[in-house]
Image (tube, grey):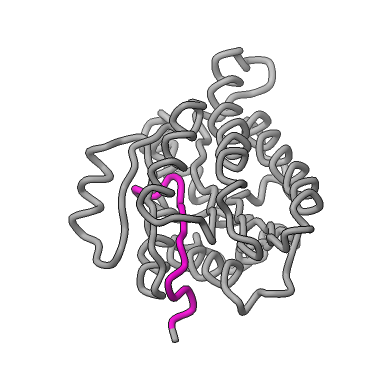
Amino acid sequence: MKKLHNKVAIITGANSGIGLATAKLYLKEGAKVVLSGRRKEALDEVAASLTGDFITVTADVSIAEDNKRLIREAINAYGNIDILFLNAGVVLKPTPTDEITEKHYDEIFNINVKGPILAIKEALPHINDAGTILFNNSVVTQRGFDGLGIYSATKGALRAYQRVLTSEVKSRKIRVNSIAPGPIATDIFTKMGLPKDITEEMGKGFAQRVPLGRFGTPEEIAKSALFLVSDDASYINGIELEVDGGMSQI
């Protein structure tokens, strides 16, 4: 039997990168998948390339009403939830501490922290007992990178929140874990608003700090996301799994 046979999974930020790779794998493993993203045109394009039982929901996780609507549409389509993968996140342009603006701070925290927390609040009454919640975190909780102070703070906040949530849902046997990817070959670097040559140099710098000497792929992260929500990980709870080619260990 497939690992996620008849399970209902919600994935935020599912229109590209890690979210899309995970959606494809979950569908392959028999899940019913709700793909969420901010850009309707991107979701429509993705939908045309997927096979399996799924719906798409255009939603901005930083907006409270969008989180309510996401969960409502998922429940209307499939009933209760088995898997909630809080994947949506943003980095933005690297900004030194003395150049941080309120707008920069608010945008990153609203998407990376407020969004997942509000989505969980809306989803919890509908998550089946023994279901699972998964965060997409980052190697930045283990290593410091100049200019990524606010981004790192958001991921640190998620890790702290995850520990509390793990305890709060223990009576329902809901497992709460997170993945902490290292540098992954997605379009997140191109969205930082930097010139292409600077982006490429930044990417080379990150790769050089990875013992395996390369970026990871979204598909490699998706395999970890499958493992942690499947019965193969039935006694794994409250952890952060570093999937970073060894970057956090040296």
Q: Is residue 184 magenta?
A: no
Q: Taking 244 as reference, is 153 left or right?
A: right
**Which one is in front, 78 or 198?**
78
Residue stretch in magenta: 2-15
SS majority, magenta:
loop
Task: Name the quadrant containing residue 199.
Answer: top left
The quadrant holding residue 188 is: top left
Residue closest to the eye, 158 or 212:
158
* Side (left or right) of 201 relative to 105: left
Q: Is residue 21 left or right of residue 208?
A: left
* Residue at horizontal 76 percent and vertical 53 percent from the top: 166
- Name the image quarter holding residue 182: bottom right
**In the picture shown, does residue 172 fall above or below 14?**
below
Count how many numbered circles sit on residues in the image: 0
Name the residue located 65 percent from the left edge and 65 percent from the top edge: 130
The residue under the point 53% across, 32% down is 111
Q: Position of residue 27 (x, y in %)?
A: 36, 68
Q: Residue furthest left?
A: 48
- Image location of residue 85, percent across then percent down: 53, 53
* Residue 191, horizontal then vertical, whole percent: 40, 35
